[in-house]
Image (spheres, grey):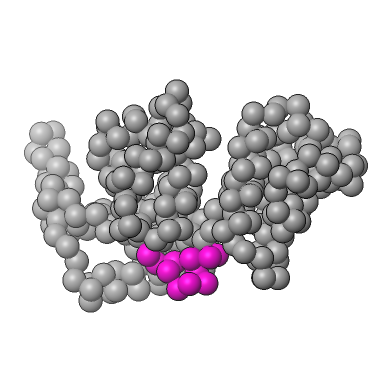
Amino acid sequence: MHGASEHSLRGLLERTEEVLSSGADASTVGNDLFALALTLDHAHSLRRALTEPVVPAEAKRRLLHSLFDDRLGAEALRAADAGVGVRWSSTHDLSDAFEQASVAAHVAKADAAGRLDDLEDDLFRFSRIVEASAALREALSDPFAPVEGKRRLVEDLVGDKVEPTTTTLLAQAVSGRHRSLTTVLGLYQRIAAARRDSMVATAWVAAPLSEEHRERLTRALSAQQGRKVHLNVVVDPEVLGGVRVAVGEEVLDSTVSTRLRAAQRRLER
């Protein structure tokens, strides 16, 4: 998001955090906010009404409550109030913001249970499974396939091997709000990392890292970036040796395979 939407999103996330801090059930708030996002996806006129700049904020809040007071919890609507009283660059940004607030609520639950690391690792591993299988990616991204069928497929894949919060977020990810499943999984990982103001880094190595080496690399990346880094590790034999690290849009590549390709290009000149 950019411009007015970016500022409005921050306000919505702050209000969601306030609601959770007051004792609201994070799962219920998260589920309700995502249900609101899905509803707005299919209600263009309602999205326009709730984002129209010339309409007073209080009038938009009254409209929201008149439609959803008997369908969603009071805590989720208290958070949603912060979303309909501000400016958005596009109507779709409001739906996207409610989804991000939903994810933030579920992430807060995992954090409170001391399982945030597990959640981030689960999301990363599932994204790797999706990236490695074109058939699975197509099945879970098919806009014409029933959502419940895709969710059952996810449940069959992960079973009880992941956190319940992970299963909830994966069910949201395959709901059809986004064209690219890998993109939405990446977004969810970034929201989880933002919970503790950390960045997501991915390292490609030829063989599994020892815990000591993983911790050293994490500390080095954190020092370089000036903030905490959550490190995901991908074992890829084609790397041969060394390590390639991606942090945001920055890529640090010291792999043997890359150096060999560079040497080959120099010889071919």
- Find residue 27 and report its image quarter: bottom right
Specify the farthest residue to the top. 144
- Find residue 51 and report its image quarter: top right
> What is the x, y in percent for residue 228?
44, 69
Instruction: Identify the residue at image location x=78%, y=51%.
Output: 81
Instruction: Identify the residue at image location x=38%, y=40%.
Output: 152
> What is the x, y in percent for residue 196?
51, 68
Instruction: Identify the residue at image location x=61%, y=37%.
Output: 38
**Observer able to see residue 117:** yes
**Quadrant where the N terminus is found in the figure:** top right
Specify the farthest residue to the bottom. 212
**Image: 107 above or below 268:** below
Q: Is residue 177 left or right of residue 224?
A: right
**Quadrant where the C terminus is found in the figure:** top left
User: Magenta stretch: residue 194 in it?
Assistant: no
Query: Magenta residues, as a range?
Result: 108-118
Give the tally of numbered discs: 0
**Image: 65 above or below 144:** below
Instruction: Identify the residue at image location x=40%, y=34%.
Output: 149
**Observer able to see residue 93:** no
> What is the x, y in percent for residue 176?
49, 33
**Image: 51 above or below 17:** above
